[in-house]
Amino acid sequence: MKNLIIKKISKVLAVFSLIIATSCMDEWTEMNINPNQPSVVPASSIFGAGLTIVAGQLFGERIGIYYTGTWSGQLAAIGAGDYEFRVDINNGQWDNLYRAMAYFEDARKTALKEGNQNLAAVSLIMKAYTAHQVSDMWGDIPYSEAFLLGESGILNPVFDSHQKVYTKILSELEEAASILNPASGALGVGDFMFAGDIAKWRKFANSIRLRVAMRMSLVEPQAAAQVLNQILGSPTNFPVFESNADNAYLRWPGIATNNLEPWRSRLGAPTNKVDQYRTNHDLISRLIELDDPRLPVYADQNLNGFYNGYRMGIGQTGFPLNNFNNVSHIGNRFGYDDRGFSPFMHAAQVWFIKAESYERGLVSGGNAEDAYNNGITTSLLENGIPQSEIDNYLQVAGVAWGSGSTSNLEKIRLQNWISLYKQSVEAWAEVRRTDVPQLVNVSNDYASNHNRPPFRMAYPANEIAFNESFPNNVVQVDIFYGQQIWWDTRTGVY
C-alpha cells in the first residue's frame, strides 16, 4: 500500500511539474507543437494544466498582489505604489486566463469522448469560474462565441454583455452540478483541488452560484433572489461549502522552483523579507481598530515593532511611515510558504452570503446573525485562531451583532472583505459592489481626479488591435479606470 501511495504521489507531481514547465504564469508564451509527432493528451492532464494556469494568474504576483491586491485595499507596493499599466503584462494576463478557459473547454470535450461525465462537468465548472473572474475584472468579454474556432470557424468572437456572461455561467454551473455523480467517472491525476472528491466539486459549483447571485443582487435583485432561494432553500439538493474542509484551495507541492506557491516564489524566503510588496493601511488599520486576532497571521510587525500598512494618497512616496522599515510585510501563511495555497473560494464567504441574503430579505427563513457568526468563526479557525479568542472577538464592539455605530449589513460586508485576504480579485469586486470598506485613499497620481480605486481592468492592446468584434463604445478613463461595470450601482464615485 505504501508503495502504491508513493507511486501515485510521484505520478501527480510528475504531471504537475510538466504542466508548470509548459505554462507561463504571468507572461504568455506559445507552446511549440511538432506535427510529425502527434500525441493524445488525456482530459485529466489538460484539466490540470488549466487549473495551474488560473491559479498562477489570479493568485500570482501581478493580479493577486499588485493590481487587484492594491485596488482591494489589502496590499500595496513600496516605491511603486502608484497604479501601473504595462502593455505586455496586460496582454499576458488576458491571454493566460483565456488560455485556461480554452484548456477547460478542451478538457470537457475530451472527457466526453473518453466517456467521463464527471471530468466534463468539473471542466465546465472551472471554465465558468474563470469567466466569472474575468468578467468581474473587465466587464463585457467574449464568451458565448469564444473557443469555437475549430468547430464553427469563429475567429473574432463577439463581446457578450457582463449581464449575459452572468446568465450563461449561472446556467453552466447548474448544469454541471446536476451531472456530477460518484459513479460517472474518476477525475484522474489532474484534480489538484479536491483530489477526485465529487461531493466537494458539487458544493463548489453551488457555492459559486451563490457568489454570482449575490454579486448581481443590487442590479438584478429578483433574478439573484431566485438563485439564492433555490440553493439555500434546498440544501440536500444543492449542498454548499460549510466548513474549511470544503475550501477550494490548490495547494502547491513546493518541491522545486517551478512548484513553489506563486506569492512565495516572488516574495522570497521568510527569513529574509525585503520585497517591496507589503500590506495596505486600509486593511491593517481596520484589523487594529477591531483588535482582530487575524492581524499577526495576515501581517508581520514592522522593523520598529508595530503593525502598519502602506498609505495611498497625495504625497504617499514621501510619507515617513511608507518606507521599507515601517510597512508591515505579508504574513508567512499567505506569502512565505513553499507549499502554500491558491484560494479559489472558501466556506467563510458562503456564510457571509447567507447572512446578507437573510439580512436583506432576499431569502426568508434563515438567521442572519447565526450565519454572520459562523462566517467569522470559520475564517478565524482557518487562520489558526483558538476558539477562546474567537468567542472574545465575537463580543468586540463593532464586531458583535447589533453593536457599535455600523449596521449589521455593513458588519457582514466588512467581515466578508476581511476574510477574502489573498482572494484579491474577489475582495476588489466586493468593495466595488458594496463600498464597504469605503476606499478613498487613491494612489498619488490619480488622487486629484478620483475618489475611489479603479473600476475595471483595461482591455489588452492585442484584443483591441486583432479582434474585429471589439466594441467601439468602450470608454477608457485614465488608462484603466474605465466606467463602472454592470453590477456596480454606487453613486457619487469617480
Image (cartoon, grey):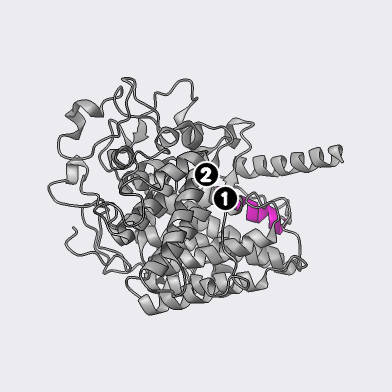
Whether the residues at callouts 2 and 1 have beta carbons within 8 Å, the answer is yes
Instruction: Give the structural element (helix, strand or loop) at label 1.
Output: helix
Q: Amino acid at mark 2?
A: Leu
Q: Is residue 392 above or below residue 344?
A: above
Q: Nearer the viewer, residue 128 or 197?
A: 197
Q: Residue at x 14, y 51 (%)?
A: 449
Q: Earlier in the sequence, mark 2 or mark 1?
A: 1
Percent coordinates x, y for residue 470 in the rendering: 35, 67
Q: Residue at x 30, y 42 (%)?
A: 286
Assess disc 1: are there few (<14), some (14-19) or many (≥20) residues with their C-alpha within 10 Å of its C-alpha.
Answer: some
Q: Residue furthest left?
A: 448
Q: Residue at x 25, y 29 (%)?
A: 322
Disc ID at residue 307: none
Percent coordinates x, y for residue 334 in the rendering: 48, 37
**Alpha carbon distance from label 2 to label 1:** 8 Å
Residue under label 2: 381
Percent coordinates x, y for residue 1 in the rendering: 87, 41
- Indicate left or right for 371 with 217 as reference: right
Q: Residue at x 52, y 38 (%)?
A: 384
Q: Is residue 458 visible?
A: no
Which quadrant would residue 482 be assigned to in this image? Answer: bottom left
Q: What is the magenta range?
A: 42-52
Disc ID at residue 244: 1
Please tell me whether residue 362 belongs to the stretch shown in magenta.
no
Q: Is residue 82 above or below residue 164?
A: above
Label 2 or label 1, whichever lies nearer to me, is 2
Q: Nearer the viewer, residue 384 or 148?
A: 384
Q: Amino acid at mark 1?
A: Asn
Q: Is residue 320 above or below residue 200?
A: above
Instruction: Give the structural element (helix, strand or loop) at label 2.
Output: helix
For the stretch drawn in magenta, what is the main secondary structure? helix
